[in-house]
Image (spheres, rainbow, N blue to C red):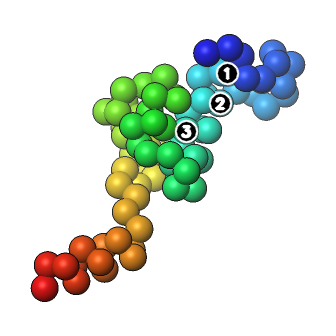
């Protein structure tokens, strides 16, 4: 993957490319824009490593919308 930010910007925000990719993956996942598998791939990690990164940040490893849960429960009844 080519650099997404210049060295100057990375220096200014005090992050390296891997941290930016991880944070972008997390943000896109939490916004519901991509799946956890795609977020892991974007972050340059496998799914297990990405889930650990989420857990380390005390973020949900599973982000299942409440409406989907309600629909599933209704279908079970």
Tag 2 secondary structure? helix
Q: CA distance from mark 1 to mark 3?
A: 14 Å
Q: Estimate the x, y position of residue 52 in percent, counting from the top left.
A: 37, 37
Mark 1 and mark 3 lie on one chain; the one further toward the N terminus is: 1
Q: Nearer the viewer, residue 2 or 20?
A: 2
Closer to viewer: mark 1 or mark 3: 3
Vertical order, 61 against 65 (above or below): above
Query: Would you identify the image quadrant in which residue 15 lies?
Result: top right
Residue 60, given in percent of the width and then of the height, sits at 41, 55
Q: Position of residue 35 (x, y in %)?
A: 43, 45
Q: Disc 1 marks which residue?
A: 16
Residue at 45% x, 52% y is 59
Q: Quarter-wise, where is residue 13 in the image?
A: top right
Q: Is residue 20 visible?
A: yes
Label 1: how many residues lie within 10 Å, few (<14), some (14-19) or many (20+)? few
Q: Residue at x 39, y 37 (%)?
A: 37
Residue nearest the observer in this picture, 23 or 69: 69
73 or 53, nearer to the observer: 73
Say which residue label 3 marks: 25
Q: Element at badge 1?
A: loop
The residue that label 2 is drawn on is 20
Q: Is residue 67 above or below residue 17?
A: below
Q: Please tell me in which quadrant of the rendered image residue 16 appears.
A: top right
- Callout 2 touching callout 1 (CB < 8 Å): yes
Residue lying at the far front in this picture: please name it.
75
Crowd class of label 2 (few under 14; some 14 to 19; many from 20; radius 10 Å): some
- Residue name at image x 19 percent, y 79 percent: 75
**Secondary structure category for the residue under label 3:** helix
């Amino acid at each position: 993957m080519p650099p997404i930010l210049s060295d100057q910007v990375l220096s200014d925000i005090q992050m390296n490319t891997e941290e930016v990719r991880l944070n972008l993956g997390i943000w896109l996942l939490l916004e519901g824009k991509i799946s956890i598998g795609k977020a892991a791939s974007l972050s340059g990690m496998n799914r297990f490593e990405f889930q650990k990164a989420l857990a380390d940040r005390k973020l949900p490893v599973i982000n299942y919308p409440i409406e989907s849960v309600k629909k599933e429960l209704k279908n079970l009844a």
